[in-house]
Image (cartoon, rainbow, N blue to C red):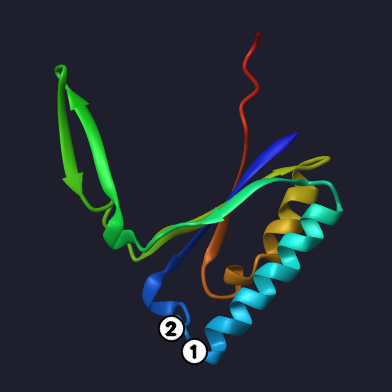
Amino acid sequence: MQYLLMIYAAESAEPTPGSDEFMQLIQEYDVFTEEVKAAGAFLAGEPLEPVSTATTVQVRNGERFVIDGPFAETKEVLGGYYLLDCENLDQALEYAAKIPSAKYGSVEVRPIMQLPG
């Protein structure tokens, strides 16, 4: 079964790019990514640019509205994701707990809906 592991954290809680803590975090992500690849679970995964680069699109009564910024005003923002193929939810949760940002943010785990056809 496929699961999307969405990584949320307050950008202010993350290490500053270029700092020793940031480089350590990147190394931890490299180790995690290699683990899920070696296990055959990795399908996709990427970090996202800061939330300040977000654009939201809405369509109301056939008219498109474009809004600078994220849809919701929250402290924690989506910073990246992994799409994994896991045996079950328990395995997906085990992987989620190993994602480095889970130490200061949260990881939402959701199964991918299997559509007929």
Label 2 element class:
loop
| Callouts 2 and 1 close, C-beta under 8 Å | yes
Task: Give whichever of 62, 92 is nearer the camera.
Answer: 62
Quarter where residue 95 is shown: bottom right
Q: Position of residue 73 (x, y in %)?
A: 26, 57
Q: Is residue 8 above or below residue 13?
A: above
Which residue lies at the image location 73% right of the left edge and 65% below the top edge?
A: 32
Seen in the image, is 15 located left or right of residue 91?
left
Q: Is residue 15 visible?
A: yes
Which residue lies at the image location 70% right of the left edge and 36% below the top edge?
A: 2
Seen in the image, is 66 located left or right of residue 97?
left
Q: Position of residue 36 (x, y in %)?
A: 78, 55
Task: Give whichever of 60, 64 is nearer the camera.
Answer: 64
Which residue lies at the image location 80% right of the left edge and 61% below the top edge?
A: 35
Residue under pointer 2: 16
Label 1 element class:
loop
Q: Which mark is residue 19?
A: 1
Q: Residue furthest bottom?
A: 20
Q: Quadrant of the C terminus?
A: top right
Q: Position of residue 26 (x, y in %)?
A: 61, 75
Seen in the image, is 116 located left or right of residue 19?
right
Q: Is residue 82 visible?
A: no
Q: CA distance from mark 2 to mark 1?
A: 6 Å
Q: Quadrant of the N terminus?
A: top right
Given the image, on which type of amino acid does mark 1 rest? Ser
Q: Which mark is residue 112?
A: none
Quarter where residue 94 is shown: bottom right
Given the image, on which type of amino acid does mark 2 rest? Thr
Task: Give whichever of 21, 2 is nearer the camera.
Answer: 21
